[in-house]
């Protein structure tokens, strides 16, 4: 079977920033939430004080919309139309069902099965902070010679790559840092 979600960017351990729509048809709630693939399942880590968490307890289905930066921000400030779980302008949507809640203090790890994936744009690519952090790190690395404070930014992005990247992105980040250490940039 074609790996539609792999094509969108769901490589093992890589966190894709989605707009998660919960609450069913009547009063849908939209929130930016990271979703990742691990050991054959899809996961998110949701704060227990959020409406998203309450909605998932009430109704164990949701949609994860694959969108761009603009829609993520609009989703946060609450100005996006949504119909049947699909946010206006989404490039793709995953219909998810909760399989398991795993309690982690103020967080809840939620494991999902994927019921359906609809791709509206065949170029759909999920947003990943590791990818954006690699870009930012490369820019700072190219400027370290001009101003030492650029190294501090690179350290900041290292943590984001560690948390949200896959093994390829982590290796590439190390390559960049090694290159910088050798003074090869
Ligand atoms: C890019 C982005 C990613 C986010 N990822 C998560 C996440 O994975 N889990 C979470 O609980 N909150 C996450 N948040 C914060 C929630 O979206 C935010 O707290 C939201 O207000 C919760 O809304 P709700 O109460 O309507 O569910 C994220 C925010 C942004 C901007």
Image (spheres, rainbow, N blue to C red):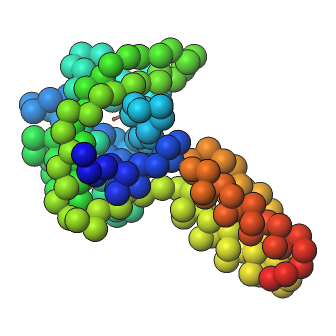
Of all residues shown, which one is farthest toward the front? 1
Q: Can you give x and y, in whole percent of width and height, for residue 25 in the image?
A: 9, 33
Q: How many marks?
A: 0
Q: Residue at x 60, y 62 (%)?
A: 133
Q: Residue at x 30, y 22 (%)?
A: 98
Q: Residue at x 32, y 19 (%)?
A: 99
Q: Can you give x and y, in whole percent of width and height, for residue 15 in the image?
A: 48, 46
Q: Can you give x and y, in whole percent of width and height, for residue 138 in the image?
A: 67, 74
Q: Residue at x 66, y 48 (%)?
A: 162
Of all residues shown, which one is farthest toward the right? 182
- Residue 59 higher or lower than 84, as above or below: above
Side of 100 where 4 appears, left or right: left
Q: Nearer the viewer, residue 25 or 139?
A: 139
Q: Quadrant of residue 84?
A: top left
Q: Quarter of the image containing the C terminus?
A: bottom right
Q: Quadrant of ligand 1?
A: top left
- Residue 107 higher or lower than 40, as above or below: above
- Residue 129 higher or lower than 151, as above or below: above
Camera sees residue 50 = no
Q: Nearer the viewer, residue 103 or 170?
A: 170
Q: Can you give x and y, in whole percent of width and height, for residue 8 in the image?
A: 34, 56
- Residue 142 higher or lower than 177, as above or below: below
Camera sees residue 185 = yes
Q: Nearer the viewer, residue 149 or 145?
A: 145
């Amino acid at each position: 079977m074609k790996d539609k979600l792999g094509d969108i960017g769901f490589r093992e351990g890589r966190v894709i920033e989605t707009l998660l729509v919960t609450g069913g048809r009547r009063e849908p709630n939209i929130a930016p939430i990271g979703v990742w693939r691990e050991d054959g399942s899809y996961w998110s880590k949701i704060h227990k004080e959020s409406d998203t968490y309450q909605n998932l307890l009430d109704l164990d289905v949701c949609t994860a919309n694959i969108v761009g930066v603009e829609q993520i921000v609009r989703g946060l400030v609450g100005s996006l139309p949504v119909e049947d779980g699909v946010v206006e302008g989404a490039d793709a949507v995953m219909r998810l069902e909760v399989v398991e809640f795993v309690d982690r203090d103020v967080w809840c790890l939620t494991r999902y099965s994927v019921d359906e994936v609809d791709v509206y744009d065949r170029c759909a690519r999920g947003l990943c902070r590791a990818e954006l952090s690699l870009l930012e790190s490369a820019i700072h690395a190219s400027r370290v010679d001009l101003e030492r404070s650029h190294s501090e930014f690179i350290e900041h992005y290292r943590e984001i790559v560690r948390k949200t990247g896959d093994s390829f992105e982590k290796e590439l980040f190390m390559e960049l840092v090694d290159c910088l250490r050798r003074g090869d940039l």
